[in-house]
Amino acid sequence: MRNCMRHLVKIVCVVFLLGLTLPGTANAEIKLGLLPRLSAMEMNTMFTPLAEYLSKETGEKVSLVIPKDFEAFKAVVSSGQVDMAFSNPIVYVQLKKSIPALEPLGLASEKAGTKFRGIIIARKDSGIEKTQDLKGKKLIFVDKDSAGGHVFQMLTLKKAGLDVHKDFIKLPFAKKHDNVAMAVFNKTADAGGIREDDLEKMKDKVDLSQIKIVAFTGYYPNWPLFSTGKMSKDVADKVRAALMKLKPNSAEALQAVGSAKITGFAPVVDKDYDTLRTAARIADLL
């Protein structure tokens, strides 16, 4: 009888331990990777409310992963270190090409809607009045794969008749949007490309009264939040449902993503980025 009881206790313990480790039986940490277009501190402040919201809605703990730069972000996604990610559309379509399992879950909506654009800035005392005046000048951009801080500008310059390989000097990438603004303000660069809505965020770092916008790029689909393929379909569906509850400009969305200057999320499918893929090929990025 005593031996039977010992065996029964062992069986109960094994079943209990298996229950802790079987998928779906316990809360698992979901890692959300963020493309670091601003400093890690700024990105953390901007997106912590979203992580907390998704944790509450899915019942899984969501934590932020903020790599040091764009290349590190792509490496983190490619190596499966994050379960989902939020990036500019250029980086998304590049990653999708090599990782077919990527699946967009929600399209970020901002003040201007679900599309965004970049700008080219210069100092007001630079003598640069129009895009063609950039010929022969020193230009600085965020990163090779920065949608609003490089790719869109390349297309704009090309449409203006400039040879993007010969007609201006391209300085080393600044890695951050605020670094571009600082370089222009300090006259290290004659002009630079950044995302339009990032300019106002730099008012405490740069005297914006000395900066002007030389050109606006066209509009393109906004940033997607996407599954990397590591998450189960069930969890991915929970995240998608949670994002769809954040209707643009709703009180719930303002609380969850207002600090990130996002008004909410809208439905999205991979095909929505086909036009951008065409643009990326023209810029030699796909």
Image (spheres, rainbow, N blue to C red):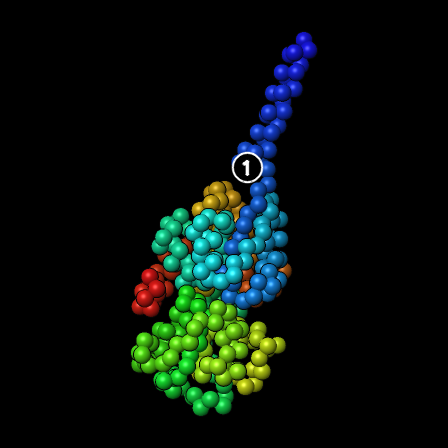
| Horizontal and vertical percent position of residue 195 | 48, 72
Quadrant (top left/top right/bottom left/bottom right) for the C terminus: bottom left
Q: In percent of the image, x 44 and y 57: which residue is there?
A: 74
| Horizontal and vertical percent position of residue 126 | 46, 89
Is residue 18 placed above or below 138 in the rendered structure? above
Question: Camera-side residue: 224 or 5?
Answer: 5
Q: In percent of the image, x 56 and y 57: which residue is there?
A: 246
Identify the element where label 1 is drawn: loop
| Horizontal and vertical percent position of residue 130 | 40, 86
Task: Provide the residue designation for mark 1.
Answer: 24
Q: Quadrant of residue 40?
A: bottom right
Q: Specify the amino acid type for callout 1.
A: Gly
Q: Please say whether residue 275 is visible from this viewpoint.
A: no
| Horizontal and vertical percent position of residue 14 | 60, 25
- Residue extending furthest top? 1
- 56 relative position to 190: left or right: right
Quadrant (top left/top right/bottom left/bottom right) for the N terminus: top right
Is residue 22 placed above or below 78 in the rendered structure? above
Q: In percent of the image, x 33 and y 76: which residue is there?
A: 164
